[in-house]
Image (cartoon, rainbow, N blue to C red):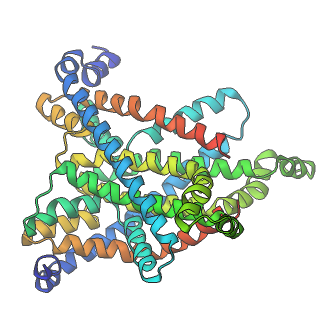
Amino acid sequence: MIDTFFNATIMAQAWPIILAGLGNTLALSLMVVPLGLAGGMALALLSTLRSPWVRWPLMAWVDFFRAFPPLVLLIFLYAGLPFAGLELGGFACVGIAFFLNTGAYYGEVLRAGIESVAPGQIEAARSTGLTRLQALIWIVLPQAVRAVLPDLLSNTLEVVKLTSLASVVALPELLFQARQAQSLTYNPTPIVAAAVVYFLLLWPLVRLLSRLENRAVAAR
Amino acid sequence: MGGWERFAETFLNAKVMERYWPDIVAGLGTTIELAALIVLSGLAAGLALAVLRSFGVRVVNWAIVFVVDLFRALPPLVIIVLIYFGLPSIDVVPSGFVSTWLSLALVLMAFSEEIFWAGITAIPRGQWEAARSTGLGFGETLAHVILPQALRITIPPLTNRTIAITKGTALGSVVAVTEILGQASSAVSNSYNPSPLTLGAAAYLVLFLPVVIFGRWVERKFR
């Protein structure tokens, strides 16, 4: 059992490959988290416009991309679009898929945050001479973000975990590298190692979230 | 041929769709079956762990917290790959279907335990004491007084989490499960046409759009 799943010799061989994968997973996360946040912020700010011409299409957009499994979106971009002569490559496909999918989730979280801020605050800010956008950015958003910080963090945890999907389109992130190492060595130790790396990387965030969530439920 | 016609010919090809829609429908059946199994077993296991945790045995609770943290931190695809490609090394050969089911059920177990537990701890201590003073036992208090209230609090977060995890059934295509995405992908490579993917995408929307809208409704209703 130890020889199969925790083989030290294989581990020594596979370690550089795994480490390169970890680097790429971190780089990928640093790309897709801001991308999703930017998309979500745009959606949330748009949702403050009261016009039904904006609100309904926006809600449809968000629900559409929340209903779509991210892997389906990714495969559609990666395996479908080339038929239309649009060959984007794995990296761009991951970027677009994450922007659309995680943007919708971040958008919902941020919208809830903005709605939790009392409307009187905008009116008060406007009366001091700020424009609507200034009031949103300087008065409402800081409070909104603080109100939904646990949800934002929880979503970010999911996004980082989701970067493992990039292995399906052959981006050399942690899971992809581990599977390469596994097929080279005929031994599952590299995958176990990748799992351990993911766990060590994300455990602190999970602990923090668990505390924040317990506090939030207790406060209701 | 105009741009639109070429687009339709490529992504909405009637001939290809006619040939492959039964496959997609079969995939839809597998997705629903997989999703139902994951939801039932994942939620049941999560509730069981939360109830077990309320007995307050320290060593047991440490173990529960560790397992929950583990399956919250690991990406579901990593767990699937680990089970599907790892276990055969010790002569346990789970199918792709079983690997996907087990993995996502474990993930849902972890997330739902956390939510159930938060719900249980949100009920004031005085309720325990009051119920016990009327002569109810620990188990009776839990089952008849605490859980009914705790479950009500947990419904909105639980609904959204369950929907998100159920969408993970698409990951099964990576380990050869013939669910919607798996069927659609093999149809694309057989027909050299992406229309089956369009059909597959439509199948996901038919399945999950009502669920997402339901989740939105639940969130409003229980707030």
Query: Can residue A86 be seen in this snapshot?
Result: no
Query: In this rendering, is residue A85 above or below B110?
Result: above
Front in this rendered view, residue A33 or A89: A33
Q: Position of residue B56 (x, y in %)?
A: 51, 77
Q: Position of residue A41 (x, y in %)?
A: 61, 50
Task: Name the residue at 93% across, 48% down.
Answer: A127
Is A6 placed left or right of B111 in the picture?
Answer: left
Is A122 placed left or right of B80 in the picture?
Answer: right
Task: Name the residue at 33% across, 19% down.
Answer: B3
Residue that lies at the very extreme toward the front in this rendered image: B135
Q: Position of residue B12 (x, y in %)?
A: 29, 21
Query: In this rendering, is residue A131 above or below B72?
Result: above
Query: In this rendering, is residue A90 above or below B36?
Result: below
Task: Tell me the quarter of the picture where residue B14 sits.
Answer: top left
Total marks in image: 0
Residue that lies at the very extreme toward the right in this rendered image: A127
Q: Quadrant of the N terminus of chain B?
A: top left
Task: Name the residue at 68% across, 53% down.
Answer: A113
Task: Tell me the quarter of the picture where residue A210 sits.
Answer: bottom right
Front in this rendered view, residue B44 or B155: B44
Query: Can residue B4 be seen in this snapshot?
Result: yes
Q: Position of residue A17 (x, y in %)?
A: 20, 74
Front in this rendered view, residue B35 or B85: B35
Task: Tell me the quarter of the picture where residue B187 sits.
Answer: top left
Residue that lies at the very extreme toward the top in this rendered image: B1
Task: Name the residue at 39% across, 61% down.
Answer: A161
